[in-house]
Amino acid sequence: MMNVLAIACHPDDLEIGCGGTLAKYAALGHNVTMVHVANGNKGHKVIQPDELRLIRAKEAQNSGALIGATVISMDVPDLLVKADQDELIAKLVDVIRQTEPDVIITHPPEDYMKDHMEVSTAVFDASFAASVPHYETKVPAPSNAKVAPIYYMDTLAGVGFLPTEYVDVTDHIETKIAMNAAHESQIKWLYEHDGIDFLDFVRTVSKFRGLQCGAAYAEGFLQCKAWPRLTTVRLLP
């Protein structure tokens, strides 16, 4: 049994990029923790930030509950995520030390918006800092602390992302879609006001990745190739 820690920027980013993989981990009996750094409070044109922040937090909990995952929010306002903020790094270190992950999934270093890229950098930095005993935060470093391997999940629509690893999520595609549908404030807005069927969008990308690896539906990943994060063990399900 593994501890799987998935850290993304906004509520719904994990569901889009690796929801099927997280569902597969959970179905196999692994412990899954889903963390979103930003609270999504600016992701709507009509609903005001204070109200939207609460709505999106609830939607994230509803989504995680579908696979029995623990859901944590760092509650950073949208567009204010900064990887060089000591407070954010310390909070991420605490989560990493508490969960003792065997693997971390997060955004790739290059993505379509700055908040995503800042989270990627922050996770890389925090996952190393979490292993340093004299980096003091609220949670002490475990005696057997290690630098966890990182896998980068897909970009939005797969733009500029060439996977080197794939996970067959065919048996979990409907759970992935349901997890995305739990983020109703986003799905409904995109459909009614922008004409975007985002659930079809998510399904299409998963089908496209499946075509690349011989599965009906799949999700693609890149391994972070930095010492000492490499391993001979297959960590993706």
Image (cartoon, grey):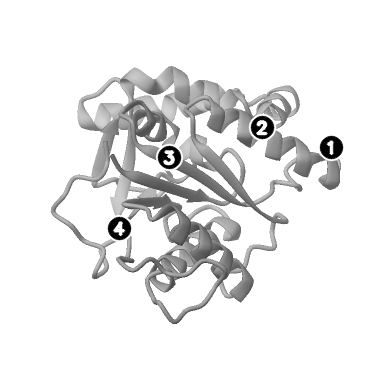
Give me the disc on residue 32. 3
Which mark sits nearer the N-terminus, 1 or 3?
A: 3
Q: Could you tell me the amino acid type at mark 2?
A: Glu
Would you name the residue on which mark 2 appears? 59
Q: Is residue 87 left or right of residue 139?
A: right
Q: CA distance from mark 4 to mark 2?
A: 29 Å
Q: CA distance from mark 1 to mark 3?
A: 30 Å
Give me the disc on residue 47. 1
Q: Select label 1 or label 2 by which is in front.
A: 2
Q: Which residue does the image show at 49% across and 54% down from the upper left? A: 111
* Quadrant of the rendering where the N terminus is positioned: top left
Of helix, strand and loop, which one carries label 1? loop
Which mark sits nearer the N-terminus, 4 or 2?
A: 2
Asked whether 30 or 156 is in front, the reply is 30
Q: Which residue does the image show at 32% across and 60% down from the upper left? A: 148
Q: Select label 3 or label 2 by which is in front.
A: 3
* Neighbourhood count class around disc 4 (C-alpha, 10 Å): few under 14, some 14–19, many 20 upward: many
Extreme-left residue of the structure: 232
Residue 85 visible from this viewpoint: no
Q: Could you tell me the amino acid type at mark 4?
A: Pro
Q: Select label 1 or label 4 by which is in front.
A: 4
Of helix, strand and loop, which one carries label 4? loop
Rendering coords of residue 180 (x, y %) = 56, 28
Rendering coords of residue 57 (x, y %) = 69, 40
Q: Could you tell me the amino acid type at mark 3?
A: Val
Give me the disc on residue 149. 4
Of helix, strand and loop, which one carries label 2? helix
Which mark sits nearer the N-terminus, 4 or 3?
A: 3
